[in-house]
Image (tube, grey):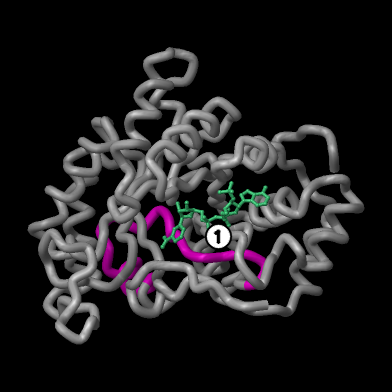
């Protein structure tokens, strides 16, 4: 590895019949508005063409502003960028989906998105509060709304033509199968935490055999303990191929057929994360075979409550 090759430009066809997703994606979970705008602008200029947003990140307007400015510049066109955003848990009631979707589009300053996904399978109490809690501090769930009900409302958005594909996030294999089997419009993308400490092979194999793209978040381990970028297998390969541990992790994710998402505010990291090249097959095998640590860094999949849990070393 070393010289530029086509890995960074990998595209994966979608099961909606007409589109493909640039596999190497940029995530916008960045709390600071100024850092959000700079990261979006810099990453577009560096070459990223796939963006993951969410109403929950509370920064769609900053992402939208940065994108609008870049598109107005004229060098990068809207239609060359794949933009996805996600519905949050307090908007799962079918009658709330369209207005949540419209609000996201407005904040993003877009007239369509390439992907609209359900952020978690957990419906929270409907309303404008993203974190509805009872007096004991426990989340109030909405038992009356099923994932399939919400999915049908997303299918209607595709019918209206303002969202090209629809997806799920933070689902397990059972939940995915249930929606897939009953869906009129199949999930095109499933976004889950995945990296060498949480490879999710069963989910990935199911996705591949059903034409679903698995988008992998925290593909660098979110920079928290246990640090994937310090794993001796990863650092050993990085040294051998003269790349950084982050680039090795991204190459592994791309070469096994997922669409990895990274987030970086640091310009050097943004450049590094796009500058990936193909790893030799034995390095891919080594990561797959030799890393046995298994860690989930973000328990949102179990509760619908977002957030990475920092661990002590
Ligand atoms: N569906 C969900 O529930 C869910 C949950 C979490 C995330 N996501 C999505 O996935 C995206 C990515 O997740 P993530 O934030 O966990 O990604 P990540 O890329 O694994 O972790 C981001 C952290 O890694 C650092 N970093 C980035 N590039 C680096 C490099 N080359 N070398 C060393 N450190 C590097 C960043 O530092 P700096 O910021 O200092 O540059 C940041 O602290 C999010 O933005 C969001 O779009 C979805």
Q: Quadrant of residue 12?
A: top right
- Decide: is 44 above or below 309: above
Image point (12%, 67%), residue name: 126
The front one of 71 and 32 is 32
Residue indicated by mark 1: 218
Whether residue 255 sits left or right of residue 303 in the image: it is right
Is 181 inside the magenta-drawn segment? yes
Residue extending farthest to the left is 95
Task: Mark 1: give few (<14), some (14-19) or many (20+) Cα within 10 Å.
Answer: many
Of the 4 image quadrants, the one containing the N terminus is top right
The front one of 118 and 34 is 34
Q: Quadrant of residue 48?
A: top right
Of the 4 image quadrants, the one containing the C terminus is bottom right
In the image, residue 242 lies at what x, y percent?
87, 45
The front one of 165 and 279 is 279
Image point (31%, 42%), residue name: 60
* SS category of the residue bearing label 1: loop
Q: Which stretch is magenta? A: 176-197
Q: Quadrant of residue 181?
A: bottom left
Whether residue 243 sits left or right of residue 257 in the image: it is right
- Decide: is 172 above or below 230: below
Residue extending farthest to the bottom is 136
Image point (82%, 60%), residue name: 235
In the image, residue 41 lies at what x, y percent?
48, 29
In the image, residue 284 lies at what x, y percent?
78, 60
Q: Is mark 1 within 8 Å of ligand 1?
A: yes
């Amino acid at each position: 590895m070393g010289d530029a090759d086509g890995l960074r430009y990998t595209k994966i066809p979608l099961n909606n019949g007409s589109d493909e997703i640039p596999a190497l994606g940029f995530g916008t979970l960045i709390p600071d508005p100024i850092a959000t705008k700079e990261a979006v602008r810099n990453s577009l200029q560096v070459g990223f063409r796939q963006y993951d947003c969410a109403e929950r990140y509370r920064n769609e307007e900053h992402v939208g502003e940065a994108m609008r400015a870049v598109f107005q510049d004229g060098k990068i066109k809207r239609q060359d960028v794949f933009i996805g955003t996600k519905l949050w848990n307090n908007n799962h009631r079918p009658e709330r989906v369209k207005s949540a979707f419209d609000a996201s589009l407005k904040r993003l300053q877009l007239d369509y998105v390439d992907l609209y996904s359900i952020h978690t399978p957990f419906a929270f109490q409907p309303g404008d509060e993203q974190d509805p809690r009872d007096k004991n501090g426990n989340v109030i769930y909405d038992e009356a709304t099923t994932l399939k009900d919400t999915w049908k409302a997303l299918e209607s958005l595709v019918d209206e033509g303002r969202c090209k594909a629809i997806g799920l996030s933070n689902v397990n294999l059972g939940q995915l199968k249930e929606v897939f089997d009953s869906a009129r419009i199949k999930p095109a993308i499933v976004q889950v935490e995945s990296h060498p400490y949480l490879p999710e092979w069963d989910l990935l194999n199911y996705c591949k055999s059903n034409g679903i793209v698995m988008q992998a978040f925290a593909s660098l381990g979110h920079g928290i303990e246990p640090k994937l970028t310090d794993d001796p297998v990863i650092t050993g390969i990085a040294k051998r191929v003269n790349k950084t541990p982050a680039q090795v992790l991204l190459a592994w994710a791309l070469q096994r057929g997922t669409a990895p998402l990274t987030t970086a505010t640091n310009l050097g990291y943004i450049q590094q994360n796009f500058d990936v090249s193909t790893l030799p097959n034995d390095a891919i095998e080594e990561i797959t075979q030799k890393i046995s640590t298994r860690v989930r860094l973000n328990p949102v999949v179990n509760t619908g409550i977002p957030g990475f849990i920092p661990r002590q070393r």
